[in-house]
């Protein structure tokens, strides 16, 4: 009887110690995924834009402008929306900081953006002319709003995850941006040099997806160790 009691007390002590130590031993620090998305192949000619249809737009771009469908700098591909494709354990906090879609010089800035479900999209008119904002999602509800004056802002949200879809302006048919919506916060848009960083990623092995507005979806793999950086390089190829 006495032996049993002693053992029980020892077991309890071990148990208490393990409970005390458990959070530290199991703590897995979030890491990140970084990398570069590249493009190899023949680049299509940029779309030439003449803005004579709207005197205010013409004033902002007297010599016209152009929009690159595939924007490559030093081999790096800009405006690629990179995200984790495989499910991520745990529930990530929603993103609440608004993402801005600006209309400036009768062009959209940025040319591509990504949002988490229900993250605010702030649409701004920085031009002295009428713009109308017309996203064309398939899964989410679309909308079509006019912004007749400079300085106007509208806030919108998309409540479902959806792959990349276009936004256009019915007044200025050359205007184009692209939006993707995710049900998690693990995404980023590549910078001008094709690089990206997805932060606060729990340790794990991930399939990484790269979506470009006019190219087919590509994937890669990244491994994130506790507190570490997983890297992935994905190359799109043209015709
Ligand atoms: Cu417009």
Image: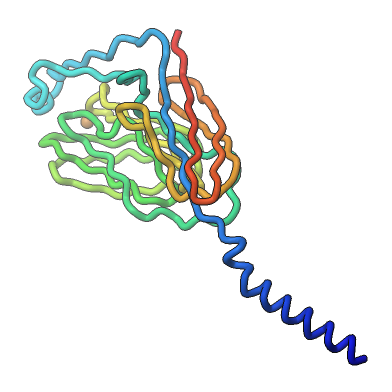
- For the N terminus, the image quarter is bottom right
Residue pictured at 13% horizontal, 42% vertical: 150
Please determine whether, in this image, residue 26 is positioned above or below residue 148.
Answer: below
Residue pictured at 47% horizontal, 27% vertical: 233
- For the C terminus, the image quarter is top left
Ligand 1 in which quarter: top left
Image position of 58 (left or right of 36): left
Residue pictured at 43% horizontal, 46% vertical: 199
Residue furthest out toward the right? 1
Residue 203 horizontal/vertical position (percent):
56, 48
Report if residue 91 is visible in the image.
Answer: yes
Camera-nearest residue between 119 and 188: 188
Please determine whether, in this image, residue 70 is positioned above or below residue 127.
Answer: above
Residue 94 horizontal/vertical position (percent):
45, 55
Image position of 12 (left or right of 47): right
Residue 171 horizontal/vertical position (percent):
23, 28
Residue 20 horizontal/vertical position (percent):
62, 74
Camera-nearest residue between 21 and 50: 21
Camera-nearest residue between 166 and 119: 119
**Residue 21's image quarter?**
bottom right
Image position of 221 (left or right of 211): right
Please determine whether, in this image, residue 153 is positioned above or below residue 51.
Answer: below
**Residue 73's image quarter?**
top left
Please determine whether, in this image, residue 46 is positioned above or below residue 14.
Answer: above
Residue pictured at 45% horizontal, 34% vertical: 82
Report if residue 167 is visible in the image.
Answer: no
What is the tally of numbered marks visible in this picture?
Answer: 0
Residue furthest out toward the bottom? 2
Colouring rule applied to residues: rainbow
């Amino acid at each position: 009887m006495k032996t049993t009691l002693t053992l029980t007390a020892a077991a309890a002590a071990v148990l208490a110690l393990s409970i005390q130590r458990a959070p530290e031993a199991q703590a897995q620090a979030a890491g990140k995924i970084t990398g570069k998305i590249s493009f190899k192949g023949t680049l299509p000619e940029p779309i030439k834009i003449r803005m004579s249809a709207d005197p205010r737009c013409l004033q902002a771009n007297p010599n016209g402008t152009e929009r690159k469908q595939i924007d490559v700098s030093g081999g790096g591909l800009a405006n690629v929306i990179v995200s984790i494709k495989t499910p991520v354990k745990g529930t990530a906090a929603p993103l609440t900081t608004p993402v801005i879609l600006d209309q400036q010089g009768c062009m959209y800035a940025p040319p591509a953006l990504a949002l988490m479900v229900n993250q605010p999209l702030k649409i701004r008119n920085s031009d002295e002319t009428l713009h109308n904002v017309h996203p064309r999602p398939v899964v989410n509800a679309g909308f079509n709003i006019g912004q007749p004056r400079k300085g106007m802002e509208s806030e919108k949200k998309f409540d479902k995850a959806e792959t990349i879809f276009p936004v256009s302006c019915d007044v200025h048919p050359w205007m184009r941006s692209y939006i993707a919506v995710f049900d998690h916060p693990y995404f980023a848009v590549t910078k001008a040099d094709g690089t990206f960083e997805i932060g606060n990623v729990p340790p794990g092995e991930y399939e990484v997806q790269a979506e470009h507005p006019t190219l087919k979806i590509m994937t890669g793999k990244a491994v994130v160790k506790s507190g570490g950086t997983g890297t992935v390089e994905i190359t799109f190829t043209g015709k």
